[in-house]
Amino acid sequence: MKNILVMGAAGQIGSELTPALRKIYGNANVVASDIKEDVPAVLCEDGPYEVIDCLDAKKIAEVVKKYKIDTVYNLVALLSAVGEQKPLLSWQINIGGLMNLLELGREEQFALFTPSSIGAFGPTTPKQGTPQNTIQRPTSMYGVTKVSGELLCDYYHLKYGIDTRGVRYPGIISNVTLPGGGTTDYAVEIYYDAIKKGSFTCNLKKDTRMDMMYMPDAVKAAIEVMEADPAKLIHRNCFNVAAMSFDPETIANVIAEHVPGFTIDYDIDPVRQKIADSWPDFMDDSAARAEWGWNPDFDLEAMTTDMLEVLRKRLT
Ligand code: NAD
């Protein structure tokens, strides 16, 4: 990786992945881009920034040529809860943007990282120890786009030799940019409310267990899978990557150990609950561990200590 383009850089993951990439590969060699014109200085002042709509194939091609891009991180997506409100737009953006990159990749031969998600699984998928290769019949539009994306990336690799790679992220917990409307957002909001209010109203039932990951591990996964020796990759697009798995009651109990008197109550959002109920409790990530050495640094306790320390400094 020498010249990198990050699409969707202003989102929850891009706003932390972009500075991490710039630290490794040099500020000038990592071009940030998003549909947003007004973005934080860390994206548009520390290195190049381009406004790109992922549906504008011509503009993507111009930027790829201008900066001699050899690696693209494609983070553009409408997330699960938003996708249920706008299914057609979700399909157009998630798949339209990806297809533009895959088609351009045939000419330019850049490597392409596109994250999939636990949302690529559905109610008929085995929920515990969800295997790398298993039933994928998701019931959300987000999930439909994620499975389609996995298949398209595999297809363009097999047919045209494009170096496509990806991981199935769990819910990502972070403290820089708020999440963009996913089903696991509660696990970020709970930390903010613990500091600000000492209490939290959760939109999922207390025993809704899902895979989660702290942002430093999400950034590490994206960089390491792209740096992996291609000869060792069997799966390429859509490695299960896991770090921790919990339900709202468990995370609340861990937070209460750090924030005395912290309380949680529940006001269920039926749309998010239905999606969450269709997702795995925990994934088997042995393929990622075997093929490119995946190994997360943060468990629930370590993440909670770090999240609360960062947010206390900022919010109190
Ligand atoms: P996000 O919603 O926070 O960010 C997406 C970014 O895309 C935003 O900055 C938005 O402005 C931009 N965007 C929207 N429409 C665009 C368009 N037409 N052209 C260009 N940019 C556009 O998402 P995220 O949480 O950073 O997720 C990044 C990727 O990781 C997505 O593929 C998502 O499905 C995947 N993922 C995220 C999570 C999570 O918990 N955050 C979990 C699993 C998978």
Image: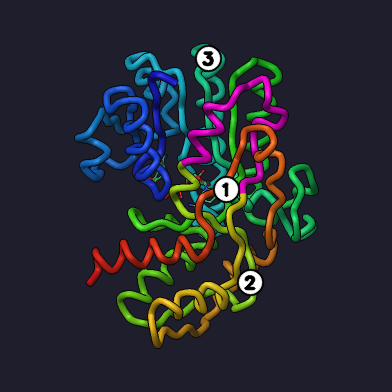
From the image, tell me which residue sits under label 2: 208
Report helix, strand or loop for mark 3.
loop
* Residue under the point 33% across and 17% down: 67
**Which residue is under mark 1?**
169
* The one of 225 and 171 positioned closer to us in this rendering: 225
Q: Can residue 18 be seen in this view?
A: yes
Instruction: Say whether residue 4 is magenta.
Output: no
Residue at mark 3: C-beta within 8 A of ligand 1: no
Say which mark, if any, is on residue 109.
3
Looking at the image, the residue that sits furthest to the top is 107
Under tag 1, what secondary structure? strand
Q: Residue at x 40, y 70 (%)?
A: 191
Distance of label 2 from label 1 (alpha carbons): 18 Å
Front position among marks 3 and 1: 1
In space, the residues marked 3 and 2 are separated at their CA atoms by 42 Å
The amino acid on which the numbered mark 3 sits, given as a three-letter code, is: Gln
Circle number at residue 257: none
The answer to whether the beta carbon of the residue marked 2 is less than 8 Å from any atom of ligand 1 is no
Which one is nearer the viewer's eye here, 196 or 112?
A: 196
User: What's the amino acid at mark 1?
Assistant: Tyr
